[in-house]
Image: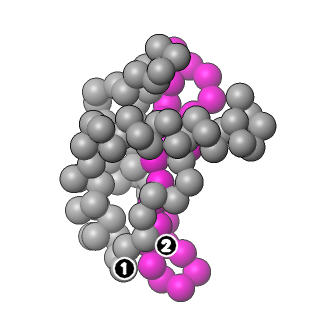
Amino acid sequence: MEVFVRFTEPIVSHGGTAYYPRVCGRKDSIGRWEAWLEFEPENGGPTLRSDRETVQPNRTDVSYWAGGLTRVYLEGALDRAQTVTHRNGHG
């Protein structure tokens, strides 16, 4: 796993918890790159992880994709990551 971008501005959940997002990725079994978002809570606790957010042909394209993420996208991804966590019984 590789961390492509660490955002320094927190995203605040609907519950009021501040999370610092980061874009993570890895090469899949057929050579493409997949990426997801992880959200580390400011006050400690478990890191939330979204499902796969994108598949790109190479790591350069993942980096480009990550660089274009907006605050609105990150807020939506945090909502998705919280849904994944609850669906998997971790929250």
| Type of amino acid under label 1 | Pro
Question: Is 27 placed left or right of 21 in the picture?
Answer: right
Residue at (46% x, 23% y) in the render: 13
Q: Is residue 48 left or right of residue 87?
A: left
Q: Badge 1 is on which residue?
A: 57
Q: Which residue is mark 2?
A: 27
Q: Is residue 2 a member of the stretch shown in magenta?
A: no
Which span is picked out in magenta?
A: 25-49
Going by the numbered disc 2, the residue's amino acid type is Lys
Callout in the foreground (1, 2): 1
Q: Is residue 27 above or below residue 83?
A: below
Position of residue 14 measured from the top left corner of the image (x, y, whole percent): 47, 21
Q: Quadrant of the C terminus?
A: top right
Q: Is residue 42 magenta?
A: yes
* Count of all numbered marks drawn on residues in the image: 2
Label 1 CA crowd tier, 10 Å (few <14, some 14–19, many 20+): few
Secondary structure type for disc 1: loop
Relative to 63, does residue 50 appear above or below in the rendering?
above
